[in-house]
Amino acid sequence: MRRRDWLLSTAATPIAAQAMQAAPKNIVISSANGRNACKKAMDVLKAGGDTLEAVVQGVTLVEDDPNDTSVGYGGLPNEDGIVELDASVMHGPTRRCGAVASVRSIKNVARLAKMVMEHTDHVMIAGEGATRFARAWGVPEINLLTERTRMAWMAWKQSMRDGEGRNNWTDGLDAPDKKQAAALRQIFPGADDEMIAWAMEMARHPTTGTINCLALNGKGEMSGTTTTSGLAWKLAGRVGDSPIIGAGLYVDQEVGAAGSTGRGEENIRMVGAHTIVENMRHGMHPREAALDALKRIARNYSNDEKKLNQFDINFYALRKDGVYAGASLWSGRVSRGYMASFQFAVNDGGESRLEKCVHLLERKA
Ligand code: GLY
């Protein structure tokens, strides 16, 4: 067969024939912060629950956890010290979706996105409108900022300097010299050394977390959700990729599902999750499909590694036959001098485990 004919014939095949023949099975994958989420979602699948209900129940655990500072309650706030959450859901069997963006006082925004899907004629509701929608349905409101994240925000505010090296959020010129740790200890007398060190590290290297969770059940049904507090210290109203259907999440019941964590701006520009699902539709293995999406991001910077080194982004892909992959732009992330490999969580019926992401570029410590 000539190459051109071969390309046309694979493009016409909805998904690799081999993939369609494999029997579907219960499987859940997520970003590395979702081991408990995958386990919870698997329990829901095993009990015969719907795939979207499974992933929403899974990520709710992470949204509720104040120690995950990239999602839900206890997420790192915007530059004003206010936590703003984004989320999306897609339900494969009914091909429906929902999303919320810049939500300030509702903890479980994946559930709220599902409510938008189920109870409105819209796909996305943002800001004050989303809060009013939640209020109408009796969803309780809370302050999403914890003492821990307020301290990290304060450390960040104190680390800012104008051209003269001044900052209005620290002691004035007339005050005795004090190191930042001592200043923080004075404002937060209950904080221990570890918490103060963490807050100062967050001020310097804020995390870009998020959780994406994708599920397949034994009937071959698929769903997914992505939920986040977004980029730490962002401008108020900044919306990332997580609630953007096609970027932070995409599910096509015929093919598979994909989602993302990391710097959303890069993903929005090349609609990563949809790109990956389309790549799988045309026969690519989930791993190659996700690596191709990362190559598109690198291409947007003409493969300039100096610029690319300034951010991280990861993709997760689950094909309809249960074949999956996690892929990261870089081999690892440097945190407090250590290099940690990017991983993702998988549950195929037992305990959740972490697997290593394939990567596009090699990061040097
Ligand atoms: N990927 C999450 C965000 O950029 O907001």
Image (tube, grey):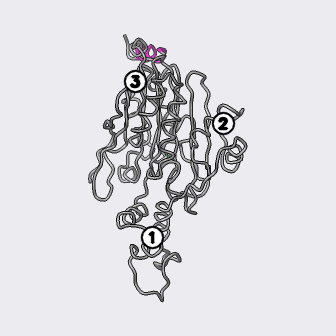
Q: Is residue 125 above or below residue 157?
A: above
User: Is 130 displayed left or right of 213 in the figure?
Assistant: right
Labelled pair 3, 1 in contact (Cβ < 8 Å): no
Q: In this view, does 58 lie above or below 309?
A: above
Q: Looking at the image, is mark 2 or mark 1 earlier in the sequence? A: 2
Report the disc number at residue 116. Answer: 2
Magenta: predominant secondary structure element?
helix
Q: In this view, does 120 lie above or below 230?
A: above
Q: Name the residue: 45% across, 43% down.
A: 261
Report the disc number at residue 284. Answer: 3
Q: How crowded is mark 1: few (under 14 residues within 10 Å), some or many (20 or more)?
A: some
Q: Does the magenta stretch include residue 61?
A: no
* Residue 104: image location, x then y, percent: 62, 53
Using the numbered discs, state the Cα–Cα distance from disc 2 to disc 3 in whole angstroms.
33 Å
Q: Which amino acid does label 3 sit on?
A: Met
Q: Which amino acid does label 2 sit on?
A: Val
Q: Over which residues does the magenta segment extend?
A: 4-13
Q: Residues within 10 Å of mark 3 (few under 14, many from 20)?
A: some
User: Can residue 118 be seen from the camera position used here?
Assistant: yes
* Residue 61: image location, x then y, percent: 48, 42
Q: Looking at the image, is mark 2 or mark 3 earlier in the sequence? A: 2
**Which residue position is annotated with label 1?**
159
Using the numbered discs, state the Cα–Cα distance from disc 3 to disc 1 in whole angstroms.
46 Å
Q: Nearer the viewer, mark 2 or mark 1?
A: 2
